[in-house]
Image (cartoon, rainbow, N blue to C red):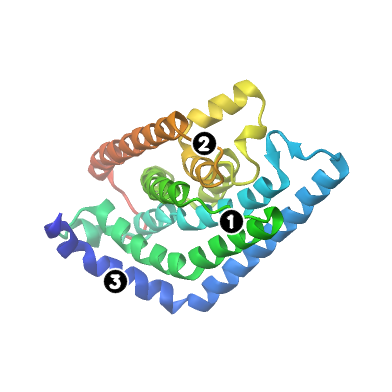
Amino acid sequence: MRKILKIYKPFTHAGVLLAAQYRVNFVFFILGDVLRCFINYFLWHAVFKSGGAETFMGFSEIDMVSYIFISFLTTTLAYSDGAYAVGEEIRDGSIAMRMIKPIRFDLAFLFQELGERTMSLLLAFLPLVAGVEIFRFFATGRFAFNLWFFLLYFVSLVLAYLINFYFNVCFGYTAFVLKNLWGANFMKDCIVGFLSGGIIPLAFMPGWLGTALNLLPFASLTYTPVMIYIGKLDGIAILLSFGLQIFWLAFFFVLQQVIWNASVKRMSVQGG
């Protein structure tokens, strides 16, 4: 482990510098998404107000507000640009330079993204968590923060990021065949955003569909960590969720290695 950290630490440093270089762009991106969260808040506030019920599908209005903002935070921190980055290197031929170096292709991207996620963590994590907890305090009149659920949420968030990273690397390798992933990557992000519970909680889906979506890897990216944070999962349910996340992480880790070994034998890049 120490040897790996020594080799790939410069990639993390490069990721931090890259994120810092465009920090103003990142801040405005975050502000734009926070505005979208407030739009969702007013939408669900209207739903609860017009319905007259205190709960909707097992969610109170406080739960729904917490879900909206924590799901945004989770999506931001678990985001991976691996598909686009890998696809672009395959398209322009620069992947050849990585292949001649004595480093693992996936780990180089992983440590670089960890540097970028560090900036996201510093700029977005504490303000959003503090904002949610302040809202819950004034809405309920009590301090609702649960340190145990918070720690479990953070573990689940780390697993969610790793799953998302290796899934996107697998998707990025399709550029060996498709050559350009711009359109396909956009479609993938839209589908994953919906299936991960980033738009509406998967608990709102019909019984059989909700069960199926919970078993897919996409639920592990947003829905599972958020449900742990807001206290909708506990005990055995959390252990089963962790087990499912570890399974999908192992699956995509092995899959990307298999695809890589098969793809490099027939690599053909534009401009390479």
Local secondary structure at mark 1: loop
Q: Position of residue 160 (x, y in %)?
A: 42, 46
**Mark 1 Cα-neighbour bin, 10 Å: few <14, some 14–19, many ≥20:** few
In this view, the residue farthest toward the front is 142
Discs 1, 2 touching: Cβ within 8 Å: no
> Which residue is drawn at the image coordinates 25% and 45% (left, top)?
264
In this view, the mark in front (3 or 1)? 1
Q: Is residue 52 above or below residue 181?
A: above
> Quarter-wise, where is residue 107 in the image?
bottom left
> Which residue is drawn at the image coordinates 15% and 64% (left, top)?
6
Q: Label 3 amino acid?
A: His
Indicate which disc residue 13 carries: 3
**Mark 3 Cα-neighbour bin, 10 Å: few <14, some 14–19, many ≥20:** some
Q: Is residue 255 above or below residue 44?
A: above
In this view, the mark in front (1 or 2)? 1
Left or right of residue 118: residue 139 = right
Please name the residue that numbered disc 1 is placed on.
Answer: 143
Left or right of residue 32: residue 106 = left
Indicate which disc residue 233 carries: 2
